[in-house]
Amino acid sequence: MTSFRTLGIREDICNALDLLGFTGPTPVQTQTIPLLLEGHHDLIGLAQTGTGKTAAFGVPIIQLLDVKRRIPQALILCPTRELCMQVTKDLQSYARSSPGIKSLAVYGGAPIVNQIRDMKYGVHIVVATPVVWSICSAGVRPISPPSKPWCLMRPMRCCRWAFRMS
């Protein structure tokens, strides 16, 4: 049986996945994680609900982060506030054994001033609904040019990793 360790996932992340009760990678994770870790940038993953799509892209994002750079390095767009909050919670769970990794949910219905402040304070991953575009127009640059182009989407450019979150 394939394990997250054999896919090349760091031990700290594997420990967090073990604590979450993951017994091994699902098919979508087995197929995508190695590609994303190898630097393949354009990938579309389609899978049913509950098959591990969030971990399929979230685990490689966490592994590839430069924790010393306290600036947004990945942007994940979600269609709803609820999904935005769920993905953020999942990412925090995957990173629970990786000190210093910060993620932030950005969505409508919450004070935008607080979200801008939190983003400027230093986060690595921004999970957002389309309100992120209004933050961009407010003068906050939510994505830094990464040393490796592995973010889910770069503003106004092109989709990099696309996962259907249904």
Image (cartoon, rainbow, N blue to C red):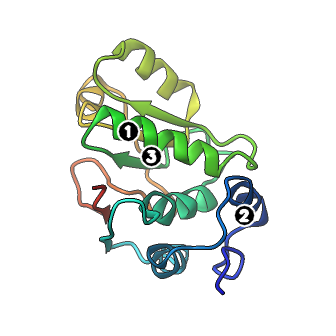
Disc with the residue nearer the chain's start (3 vs 2): 2
Does residue 122 appear left or right of residue 143 in this picture?
A: right
Which quadrant is home to the C terminus? bottom left
Alpha-carbon span between mark 3 and mark 2: 27 Å
Cβ atoms at labels 2 and 1 below 8 Å apart: no
The 10 Å Cα crowd at callout 3, few under 14, some 14 to 19, many 20 or more, is some
The 10 Å Cα crowd at callout 2, few under 14, some 14 to 19, many 20 or more, is many
Disc with the residue nearer the chain's start (2 vs 1): 2
Q: Is residue 43 above or below residue 81?
A: below
**In the rendering, which numbered label is found on residue 144?**
3
Q: Nearer the viewer, residue 8 or 67?
A: 8
Amino acid type of disc 2?
A: Cys
State the SS at label 3. loop
The 10 Å Cα crowd at callout 1, few under 14, some 14 to 19, many 20 or more, is many
Q: Nearer the viewer, residue 37 or 19?
A: 19
Does residue 141 appear left or right of residue 164 in this picture?
A: right
- Could you tell me which residue is drawn at 23 percent across and 60 percent down? 158
Q: Which residue is mark 1?
A: 84
- Could you tell me which residue is drawn at 45 percent across and 45 percent down? 87
Alpha-carbon span between mark 3 and mark 1: 20 Å
**In the rendering, which numbered label is found on residue 14?**
2
Amino acid type of disc 1?
A: Cys
Q: Nearer the viewer, residue 24 or 89?
A: 24
Q: Position of residue 139 (x, y in %)?
A: 31, 25
- Could you tell me which residue is drawn at 77 percent across and 59 percent down? 15
Disc with the residue nearer the chain's start (3 vs 1): 1
Cβ atoms at labels 3 and 1 below 8 Å apart: no
State the SS at label 1. helix
Could one spot residue 142 in this view of the protein? Answer: no
Amino acid type of disc 3?
A: Ser
